[in-house]
Image (cartoon, helix red, strand yellow):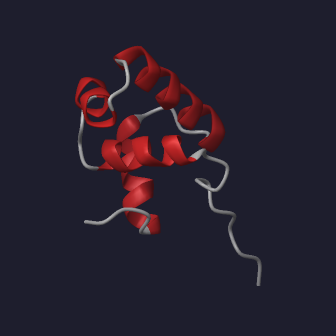
Amino acid sequence: MLQKEDPFGNLSPREHEVVCLIAKGMSNKEIAATLFISEHTVKNHVYNIYRKIGISDRTQVALLAHQLGIIDS
């Protein structure tokens, strides 16, 4: 039986943090404040996340993160 590859497996630790915060419903501005980085840097991380996992919508990223159980509910 083939196992599906973890779409989040290629993310950097920081990108993984951003995914978790997206899944908690945070905006880019809130993520920036939480991680003590600029909003521009958050936008770059979000772009890279979209590119790496092949999704272009933050709601889909959040749903996938919940489905795979990579965040605490």
Direction from residue 52 to residue 47 in the image, left or right: left
* Residue 22 rendering spot, x and y as whole percentages: 33, 42
Q: In this view, does 40 lie above or below 5?
A: above
Q: Which of 50 and 38 is in front in this view?
A: 38
Residue that protrudes farthest toward the top in the picture: 40
Residue that protrudes farthest toward the bottom in the picture: 1
Q: Which residue is pictured at 51% across the width and 22% down the height?
A: 44
Q: Quadrant of residue 30?
A: top left
* Residue 73 rendering spot, x and y as whole percentages: 25, 66
Residue that protrudes farthest toward the right in the picture: 1
* Residue 64 rendering spot, x and y as whole percentages: 44, 55
Q: In which quarter of the image is residue 61?
A: top left
Q: Which residue is pictured at 41% across the width and 65% down the height?
A: 67
Q: Which residue is pictured at 32% across the width and 45% down the height?
A: 21
Q: Which of 11 and 3 is in front in this view?
A: 11
Q: Which residue is pictured at 31% across the width and 27% down the height?
A: 32
